[in-house]
Image: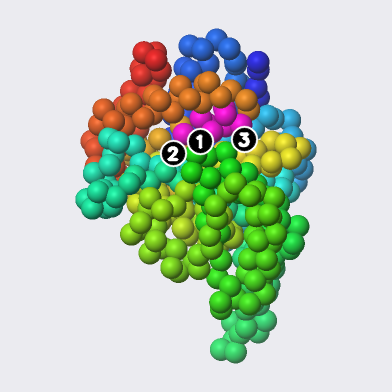
Amino acid sequence: RNYKVASIPADGFGPEVVSAAIEVVQKLAEISKTFTIEFQHIPWGTAYYKQHGKYVEDNVLEVLRRYNAILFGSVGATDVPDHISLWGLLLAIRGPLQLYANVRPVRTFPGTLSRLRDTKSGAPDIDWVLVRENTEGEYSGHGGRSHRGQKWEVATEVAIFTYVGIERIMRFAFSVAQARPKKLLTVVTKSNSMRNGMVLWDGVALEVSRDFPDVKWDKMLVDAMTVRMVNSPGSLDTIVGTNLHMDILSDLAAALAGSLGIALSSNLDPTRKNPSLFEPVHGSAFDITGKGVANPVATIWSTAEMLGWLGEGEAKDTLMQAIENVCNAGVLTADLGGTANTKEVTQAICEELEKL
Ligand code: NAI
Ligand code: MG
């Protein structure tokens, strides 16, 4: 089997972690001999913006539909406002491609456990899948500003919730939960203070749950959810929530599991009409860009999820095993308390692949 993947490393240390991930995937392809994968570089990002006045080409959909999948690095620069760069690039892809299911697996590797607060109390490890609604809600982009620059300026940021949007993400989350051993789903809302969209969200959850009688599910208000994640991680398994809520909770989850450096995100079109996008959760990390010390695991794990989505389940499992073995052996970057650099971790994973 042959795959063509669009590589969009973009800004900051995106190119450093994306090239590390490509090196690992090519090593895996070479060893397994069951597939080949061609990464084609797409230069979209802040440098492209400075040259062309836009972050992406006009025909995003047409360009990206030529590929089986997309590997993305990170966007964001010190000299462009964040809302311009994020909307210009990442959100300009997620929307048109209708990548409505953002899946963020979070788990601790035994070798990095000392970073987890909860292990001190002997509580179970983290093994969660966070499902984030990725196309509407608080990040719909609707709203505006009037009387700009005046003391009486008014700005609105309108959250849009549609039955169709909620139903499809809820159905997706219930099936993710159903496929996991615990068959346990927690639906995150804020339906006390937000009395429209969040109440609809609750109603749709109840309705969809009837089609999944074997899935145990519960509801949590988002504020209380932060406490539960910290205090009793073992009581959670699959979690679904809105665009904003899961954006925040997934960073918390990453920190609890060790570091943002191992957090990844699959942006899926479950209908498979469009290519899905795989990326690390982190941004362009200005403080470590160019130093060669970034943790490449988030991006390497992204490519493992990509292989799984493309149907290469065996390759995915092998790669996950290699990542786990390397973490357990203590080959860790500074964010996980280790002393290895990007190159050393990448090298160690490649060598591990040769042994497996
Ligand atoms: P960030 O995720 O870039 O960095 C937060 C902190 O985590 C930094 O101290 C960084 O050094 C550390 N960190 C992140 N990834 C790491 C890795 N792989 N290895 C080791 N340490 C790592 O978030 P921040 O600083 O809020 O944003 C920087 C820029 O990135 C902004 O322009 C922001 O808009 C953008 N951004 C882009 C995202 C994306 O492309 N998906 C997501 C989040 C932020
Ligand atoms: Mg975020």
Q: Are marks 3 and 2 in contact (CB under 8 Å)?
A: no
Q: Secondary structure at mark 1?
A: helix
Label 3 CB, ligand 1: below 8 Å?
no
The residue where tag 1 is placed is 302
Q: Residues within 10 Å of mark 3 (few under 14, many from 20)?
A: many
Kind of residue indicated by mark 2: Ala
Residue depicted at x 39% and y 57%: 229
Q: Residues within 10 Å of mark 1 (few under 14, many from 20)?
A: many
Quarter of the image where the C terminus is located: top left
Tag shown at residue 40: none
Lower position in the chain sequence, tag 3 or tag 1? 3
Q: Which residue is mark 2?
A: 298
Q: Is mark 2 within 8 Å of ligand 1?
A: yes
Circle 3 — which element? strand
Q: Is residue 192 above or below residue 86?
A: below
Q: Alpha carbon of mark 3 to alpha carbon of mark 1: how far? A: 10 Å
- Chief secondary structure of the magenta span? helix
- Label located before the other in sequence (3 or 2): 3
Q: Position of residue 104 (x, y in %)?
A: 51, 45
Residue at the spot 42% in from the left edge and 43% down from the top edge: 127
Q: Quadrant of the N terminus?
A: top right
Q: Residue at x 65, y 17 (%)?
A: 2
Kindly give the residue lying farthest to the bottom in the view shown: 152
Q: Which residue is mark 3?
A: 70
User: Looking at the picture, does residue 245 appear above or below residue 57?
Assistant: below
Disc 2 packing (10 Å; few <14; some 14–19; many ≥20): many
